[in-house]
Image (cartoon, rainbow, N blue to C red):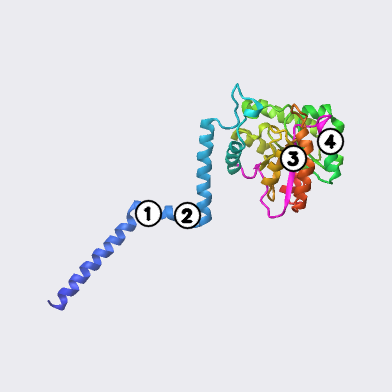
Amino acid sequence: MKISTYLIIFFIILLFALGFVLGYNQNPNATKFQNENNKFIDHNERQIYEERQIGITDQQETKNNIVFGTKTDNETESEKAPDVEYYKKAKVLQNLYPDTFIMNHQTFEKKIALTFDDGPDGKTTPRILDTLKEYNVTATFFVLGKNVKLYPKIVNRMINEGHQVANHSWSHLRPTELSLEEFLLEIDSAEEILQNYINRLEFFYYRPPYGLLTPEQIEEINYKGYKIISWSIDSLDWNVSEPEKIQDKVISSVHPGAIILMHSAGGKDQREGTIKALPGIIENLTKQGYEFVTVHNLINEI
C-alpha cells in the first residue's frame, strides 16, 4: 500500500477517537458522574455526608418506631429498657445534635463527672454531700424544682461546697409523653426557682427525666441555650440496691471524660446502695488517677 493510504487510515482513526472523547464529555450522564465524584474528593466531606445520611435515616426510623422512651401501661421501674437500649437511642440523638446532646466529653485527660439526679431531699442528699466533702470531691446535682422549693438549705449547701446544680425539670414527668407546652413548662418552672441559687455561667444545663427527648424538644432546648447532659455510665442504682454491684458497674465502665449517672433521692430504700457504694467508687477511681470535676468544668476543660 502507498504511504498516502496509511495516512488516510491514520487520520480516520484519529478523527473517530477525537469524536468519541468529545461526545463523552458532552454526555449529561458522564457530567453528572464527574460532578458526583467531585463532591467527595475530600475524604472528610464524604464521611460527614454519610454520617448525616445515617443520622437522618436513624431519626426517621426512631420516630416511626416510637423509641424515644415511651413506656407501656404495664411498665414498672425494673422493666425499663435495658442499659444497651438506652445507649442505642441516646447515640442517635448525640449524632443528630452533637453540640447539644452530650453523653461524655472527648478527652485523654483522666477527668470524670459524678452526677446525682432527683434531689434534694432531707435524708439521702445530705449523706451524699457528707461523703463528697470527706473526700474533697465535687459533683453535679440535677435537681427537681419541686424539691428545691422544699429543701432550699440543702441547695445552698451544694453551692457553698463547690458543687454544680442543674435543671432536672420541675416534677420528673417523662418528657416524651408531654406536649411541647407541658415540656417547656416543666423546664421553665424549675429554671425560675433555680435562678435564686445558680450563677448564669453554670445555669443552662439540663438532664431530661428518663434521659431521652424528641428531636422537637431538643431543638427547643437548644434555642433556649441549654446543654442537654446525658451520661456514658449508668450506675444502675435506680434498679440495684447492692453497693457492690453499683461499684462494679461504675468501676468496670470508667473512661476519660465519663459522665456517671447516680441518684441522690427517691427509691424505696432511700438510696442506701448509692450511699454505701460511693466511698468505694471514689477511692478506687482516685487510685486509678481520675480527677472528679463538675459537668461544667469537664466539658469546658476547666
- Which amino acid does the dot numbered 1 rest on? Thr
Residue located at (84% from left, 46% from top):
135
Q: Give the residue number, with chain letter if any, for mark 3.
A: 115
First in sequence: mark 3 vs mark 1: 1
Which mark is in front, 3 or 4?
Answer: 4
- C-alpha gap between disc 3 and disc 1: 55 Å
Which mark is in front, 1 or 2?
Answer: 2
Viewer-closest of 26 and 130:
130
Q: Give the residue number, with chain letter if any, for mark 2.
A: 40
Instruction: Determine whether, in the image, residue 39 is placed left or right of residue 278.
Output: left
Q: Give the residue number, with chain letter if any, for mark 4.
A: 127
Instruction: Determine whether, in the image, residue 74 is placed left or right of residue 167.
Output: left
Q: Give the residue number, with chain letter if any, for mark 1.
A: 31
Residue neighbourhood size for the residue with mark 3, other residues' Cα within 10 Å, grouped as few (<14), some (14–19), many (≥20): many
Residue neighbourhood size for the residue with mark 2, other residues' Cα within 10 Å, grouped as few (<14), some (14–19), many (≥20): few
Which secondary structure type mostly characterizes the magenta part of the structure?
A: loop
Segment tinted magenta in the rendering = 97-125
Task: Give the secondary structure at mark 4.
Answer: helix
Q: Does the magenta stretch include residue 115?
A: yes
Residue 77 visible to an observer of this rendering: yes
